[in-house]
Image (tube, grey):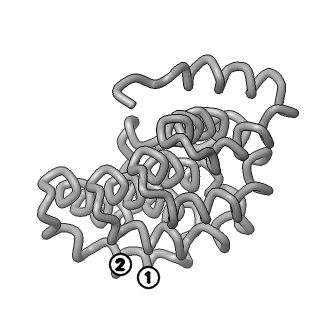
Amino acid sequence: MRSDGQANEVAELVTQRLELLPDLVDTLTSADPAARGHAADALEKVARSHPNEVVPYLPSLIRAATQDEVGMVRWHLAMTFGHTAMFPEAVAVALNVLLELLRDRNAIVRSWAITSLCIICRLHPGHAPAIVEAVSPLSRDPSAAVAKRARKAVELMTIPSLPLPKGWIKSHHIRST
């Protein structure tokens, strides 16, 4: 899984032919870890431009995000939950799994869970107190990258006038301010 495994091409194809989305989601249950990782990567890219089409599959995505042993699957799904954050029904379903992913053994998963929670906080400020409380301890994470992202996220969640970093926003439907 050192390459994207043609995730970009698959995402482009599925974006053009959304009837293929169920097949892509089904690949998350493949016995092949590489296939699952690349499918999650492609799915995250599809969710950037078609988050509304991904929302009905959230139960399957949550199952994969909490049960798959492949870190690449978990981090791309953590990113995907951020892309769907504009939909209150998606937040209601994904919030708990993102909070759980803050304790993931993989630093990249923790980092993207922080980012998606920060996006949720911006779009749904009523969740801010619980999210800030959950993210704050990660400012002392053993991973320097996670600790730095947690500190930045807490700052962004407590000072809403600050723009989100461009690298955090990959969805075409969510703005950095």
Question: Which residue lies at the image location 56% right of the left edge and 21% below the top edge?
Answer: 8
Which label sits on residue 130? 1
Q: Nearer the viewer, residue 40 or 177?
A: 40
Provide residue 13's location: percent of width, then percent of height. Answer: 73, 20
Q: Nearer the viewer, residue 138 or 129?
A: 138
Using the image, determine if residue 165 lies above or below residue 84.
above
Which label sits on residue 134? 2
**Marks 2 and 1, how far apart at CA:** 6 Å
Furthest toward the front, the residue is: 31
Question: Which residue lies at the image location 52% right of the left edge and 70% below the top edge?
Answer: 97
**SS of the residue at dot 2?**
helix
Q: Is 68 left, or right, of 11 in this rendering?
A: left
| Label 2 close to label 1 by CB (< 8 Å) | yes
| Residue 177 seen | no
Where, by quadrant of the figure, is residue 44 drawn? top right
Question: Which residue lies at the image location 52% right of the left edge and 60% below the top edge?
Answer: 65
Provide residue 53's location: percent of width, then percent of height. Answer: 79, 45
**Amino acid on which disc 1 is placed:** Ala
Which label sits on residue 101? none
Q: Is 92 left, or right, of 35 in this rendering?
A: right
Provide residue 177's location: percent of width, then percent of height. Answer: 48, 47
Q: Is 104 left, or right, of 124 in this rendering?
A: left
Q: How many marks?
A: 2
Using the image, determine if residue 89 lies above or below residue 30.
below
